[in-house]
Amino acid sequence: MIELPLAFVDIETTGSNFEQDRITEVAVLTRSPEGVEGFERLINPECPIPSFIQTLTGITPEMVLEQSPFEDQAKALFEQLQGKLFIAHNARFDYGFLKASFKRVGLDFKPKVVCTVKLSRYLFPEQKRHNLDTLIEVHGLEVSSRHRAMGDAHLLLQFWSLCLEKFGQDKLNEAVAHQLGHASLPPHIDSALIDSIPDSPGVYLFYGDNALPLYIGKSKHLRTRVLSHFQGALGKRKEMKLSLQVKHIEWIQTAGELGALLLESRLIKEKLPHMNIKLRRTKALCAWQLNEDPSGFIKPQLITAKDMNLGEEENIYGLFSSKRAATSALKGLAKKSFLCEGILGLEKLSKDAPCFGHQVKLCAGACVGKEAPAKHNLKLLTAMIHLKVSTWPYKGPVGIKEMDDVHVVDQWCYLGTVKNETELHDTLHQGKGDFDMDTYQLLKKSLSQARPESLVQLRRQSAH
């Protein structure tokens, strides 16, 4: 359900009885991939507003006298809420009032409802109270206009964003699923199977009618992530297609997130599930190698993976899935840094004639002697520095400790995950693994953030 746009809703009323009292103000703060959009209306309740309500909200009879009644604003409000996840504090109150009000004008209002009081209880069980004033105080929410509809809706958005940052999307999915009940499972999947999936890090595999998986994914919270596929089945074409085809689910627990990431990448490349597009092995992997020619200019030469000594050579720039992608990237750098595409080999030069870029003032003139080789070389090296493939920073293979597991890596290649000396010995005897672009990026980030005590220097062994 979190795949739906989120509608953070608050209303102000003349009292607490949704059959007798009426709405005086409504605000809807919608969060979607397009951004955040607000909808705010004062409503004429066509009945008195008690003095204590006026004092609490600041909404007086004079403020609503010239406003339209609910029946005139119902259609616009209904459209604002349609197809969204309805989120409110003490949601039964806001939802009850709106459902009764819509019913009076002939509209059937049946949203999926999430209460932020229940959300707070689920995520912050140590707190004794969960009213809005407590959330403001405990979490430092910024108050703009308390007890006015839009002001309180903004508080709910802040609280939701805080929960997302603190607990992550998977945990928030779990909390929402807890309120909404179990997702509608595919017909061939038993709920007992779902219940047996641990809510811990790992990789899951969805199977159809044969032995090859349809889809492979990873998560820090396996059960929650698996359920989220089926929760999103009605709102996303890909999830609907997957939900209709899946007949069996398997999973592999890992010690932590890094293990899940490495295993997911490896399994996708081995099993090639047809619903996974990303993380498949790149067969045409290539990169630029920079070499100086007799004229003094450094010129890029495109080399393929079989010609690279990745992890050992310092003169490798960029990792690209195809020659086309590599050429496009180099052309982009040339235009941005006023490099000569003729010198770079991207354009054929005629003798003593400038390149096309120089004619349109996108080249500083290296092709016709207006820019010295040293200056052009410096510009090229500066432009490509962010693409430089790092050399392996260790003397040999290393182990990355994660709980009781050790992930063995060498020359940016993932060799396997081991739990004991025997497995370590067997893994190291397999020799150097295959270089993979996704694994390189993953390991580069993980090793840069790893604590020194989590790394173990290992000795490289020869394969037999």
Image (cartoon, rainbow, N blue to C red):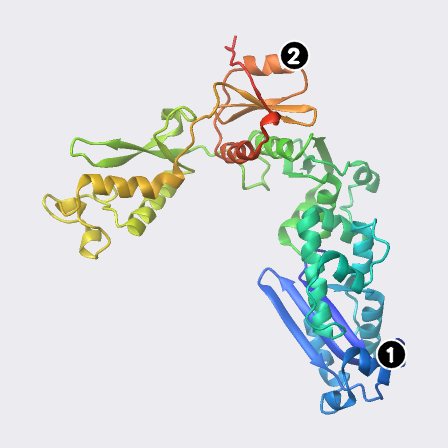
Sequence-earlier tag: 2 or 1: 1
Q: Amino acid at mark 2?
A: Thr
* Quadrant of the image occupied by residue 262: top right
Query: In the figure, 336 relative to 106: above or below?
Result: above
Q: Which residue is mark 1?
A: 15
Q: Is residue 194 visible?
A: yes
- What is the secondary structure assignment of the residue under circle 2? helix
Residue at the (29%, 49%) spot, across then down? 337
> In the current view of this chain or complex, which residue is farthest to the top?
464
Residue at the (39%, 39%) spot, across then down? 387
Query: In the figure, 184 relative to 104: above or below?
Result: above
- Bin the neighbour count of mark 1 within 10 Å (Cα to Cα): few under 14, some 14-19, many 20 and up: some
Query: In the figure, 159 relative to 276: above or below?
Result: below
Q: Position of residue 217 (x, y in %)?
A: 64, 39
Task: Identify which residue, 87 or 82, lies in the foreground.
Answer: 87
Q: Amino acid at mark 1?
A: Gly
- Give the quadrant of the N terminus: bottom right
Q: Which residue is mark 2?
A: 422
